[in-house]
Image (cartoon, rainbow, N blue to C red):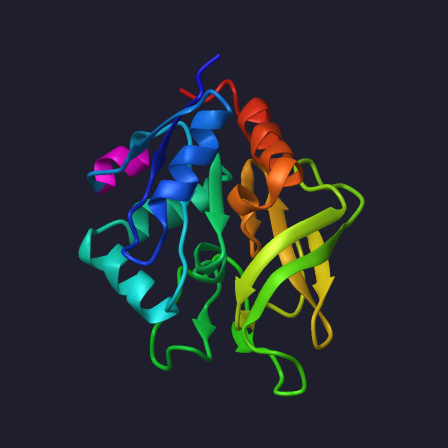
Amino acid sequence: MSRALKVIPTGTANLASVLAAFRRLGATPEIAQSAAEVALAGRVVLPGVGSFGTAIEELDRQGMRSVLRERLIEGRPTLAVCVGMQLLATISEESQGAAGIAIVPGGVKRFPDSVKVPQLGWNRVTAEPGCRFVITGWAYFANSYRLEEIPEGWVGATTNHGGRFVSALERGDVLACQFHPELSGPWGAGILGSWLDATGKAT
């Protein structure tokens, strides 16, 4: 069973922690060097922390937006983490004028001023019925922006911080997490392992 995967360097991600998490699971992650590698890879990981605008600019600079969008539309094995998940939306309040990949309808909004921003630390994730990868548990978050609703055609999980927001999305072999599974202990490792196992036929 193949456990190979390509990790996209967005320029805004802590790649070391992502690579280490997959290696602990016996996977063989490699940094993607080109759009062609992203198009051909059995599995792809899109990590990110920091700015929506900076991350999407880096994807465009590397010519990876269109191939990433195509594999997301097809439901091919792809994992998006934190800002990586936000890039699937159309726009973000964080970066006015920057267009996302637009797989998920709607925009990413900032948490209200009534709660601590950014949200840093552990919070409860509640999985919807029908989730394949995410289970209810506690995850580590580091975010100031969020999606507010699970869109039609997706299943997912929610978390409460200044109101209910989307903490994970699933469709086909696509998994998007607002939290950091690579920093969420055994629970997060279990989610990564479930995704690896479910996409084990990927080449």
Question: Is 66 a magenta residue?
Answer: no
> Which residue is painted at 54% across and 73% down in the image?
118
Q: Return the x and y of residue 31 as percentages of the image width and height.
A: 27, 37
Tell me residue 124's x, y (percent). Answer: 74, 56
* Position of 129 relative to 144 (above/below): above
Q: Quadrant of residue 39?
A: top left
Along the line of sight, the residue nearer the viewer: 131 or 184: 184
Who's the residue at 23% across and 42% down the image?
35
* Residue 119 horizontal/vertical position (percent): 59, 69
Query: In the drawing, does residue 65 fall left or right of residue 3?
Result: left
Can residue 151 be seen here? no
Quadrant of the snapshot with the C terminus: top left
How many numbered marks, from 0 up?
Answer: 0
**Foreground: 78 or 182?**
182
- Residue at image location 48% in from the left, 26% down from the top: 24
Please identify the residue farthest to the right as the structure is shown.
129
In the image shown, does 177 or 78 lie closer to the viewer?
177
- In the displayed structure, would residue 171 be above or below residue 11? above
> In the current view of this chain or complex, which residue is farthest to the top?
1
Q: Which residues are magenta?
A: 35-39
- Looking at the picture, does residue 1 appear above or below residue 143? above
Examine the residues drawn in magenta and state their main secondary structure.
Answer: helix
Residue 144 visible in this rendered orientation of the protein? yes
Q: Residue at x 76, y 46 (%)?
A: 136
Q: Taking 71 as reference, is 133 left or right?
A: right
Percent across and percent down for residue 83 are 45, 60
